[in-house]
Image (cartoon, helix red, strand yellow):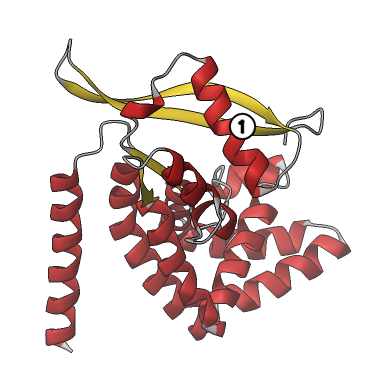
């Protein structure tokens, strides 16, 4: 939704460029959605691409996230388009699927609480110039920006000691409300459960960050992605064997 409260559908095309012999992925543009039902979205995609003079009979794929309205097998957007253009096989967004697997970890209370505490710590640290001077300008943690999420957790972990050391200073120099907030945050950050969980989260975030970046890159190469996953799996097997 844009600032005028109009739902905008983003359309991109992935194709082979014969002139340069490379696979390209280009943003085509936005098109407004009057309604958010399956039929309207499907018709909008088809009519917009046709209006842009793309030959949809040559469309050999379509990709969306795991939203049931788009990805469902019965009567959903991908199915309606595939029925009209049989070559357009549906491919789920690999980066989105990876993020869903990672999010399953949030079912663990320790992980869910740790992520919430990291968000709270980052938000607090960015709240004033004094805090930024003490711990630096930490990157916001956004759940839907996957590569940024991994980077944010990694940077929080890298600056963890600086953050903890800065809190007593802020507790001493801040007003009553700030001091109380700092004390609560300090007690949470220094608890053994949080420290252990942070180290685990930061470790897998550091491993998944390059994979996520590759999956979201324009010139994605399946061979490189497979190599990254194999490296992660071998590392996990080695760690398991060591235990």
Q: Residues within 10 Å of mark 1 (few under 14, many from 20)?
A: some
Question: Where residue 229 sits in the image (x, y, percent)?
Answer: 20, 60
Report the residue that reaches farthest toward the front: 84
Question: Where residue 130 sits in the image (x, y, percent)?
Answer: 69, 44
Relative to residue 89, is residue 240 drawn left or right? left
Report the residue that reaches farthest toward the bottom: 243
Report the residue that reaches farthest toward the right: 176
Quadrant of the image occupied by residue 18 = top left
Residue drawn at (58%, 40%) of the image: 42
Q: Quadrant of the N terminus?
A: top right
Question: Where residue 134 sits in the image (x, y, percent)?
Answer: 59, 48
Q: Viewer-proximal residue, 187 or 1?
A: 1
Residue drawn at (46%, 55%) of the image: 159
Query: Height in image: 46 above or below 168?
Result: above
Q: Viewer-proximal residue, 13 or 162?
A: 13
Query: Height in image: 55 above or below 132?
Result: above
Relative to residue 50, is residue 200 drawn left or right? left
Residue drawn at (45%, 39%) of the image: 84
Please name the residue that numbered disc 1 is placed on: 44
Q: Viewer-proximal residue, 43 or 36?
A: 43
Total numbered circles: 1
Question: Where residue 116 sits in the image (x, y, percent)?
Answer: 62, 68
Mark 1 secondary-structure assignment: helix
Q: Quadrant of the C terminus?
A: bottom left
Query: Height in image: 138 above or below 232?
Result: above
Relative to residue 89, is residue 115 drawn left or right? right
Query: Height in image: 72 above or below 221?
Result: below
């Amino acid at each position: 939704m844009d600032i005028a409260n109009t739902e905008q559908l983003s359309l991109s095309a992935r194709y082979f460029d014969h002139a340069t012999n490379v696979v390209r992925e280009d943003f085509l543009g936005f098109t407004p959605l009057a309604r958010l039902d399956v039929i309207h979205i499907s018709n909008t995609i088809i009519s917009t691409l046709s209006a842009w003079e793309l030959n949809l009979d040559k469309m050999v794929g379509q990709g969306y996230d795991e939203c049931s309205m788009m990805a469902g097998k019965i009567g959903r957007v991908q199915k309606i388009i595939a029925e009209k253009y049989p070559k357009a096989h549906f491919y789920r967004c690999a980066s989105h699927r990876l993020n869903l697997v990672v999010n399953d970890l949030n079912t663990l209370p320790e992980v869910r609480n740790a992520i919430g505490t990291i968000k709270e710590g980052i938000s607090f640290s960015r709240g004033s110039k004094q805090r930024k001077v003490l711990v630096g300008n930490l990157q916001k943690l956004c759940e839907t920006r996957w590569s940024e999420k991994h980077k944010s957790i990694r940077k929080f972990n890298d600056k963890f000691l600086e953050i903890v050391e800065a809190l007593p200073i802020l507790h001493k120099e801040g007003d009553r409300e700030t001091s109380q907030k700092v004390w609560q945050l300090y007690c949470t950050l220094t608890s053994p459960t949080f420290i252990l969980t942070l180290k685990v989260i930061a470790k897998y975030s550091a491993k998944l960050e390059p994979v996520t970046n590759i999956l979201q890159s324009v010139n994605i190469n399946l061979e490189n992605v497979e190599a990254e996953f194999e490296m992660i799996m071998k590392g996990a097997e080695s760690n398991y064997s060591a235990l």
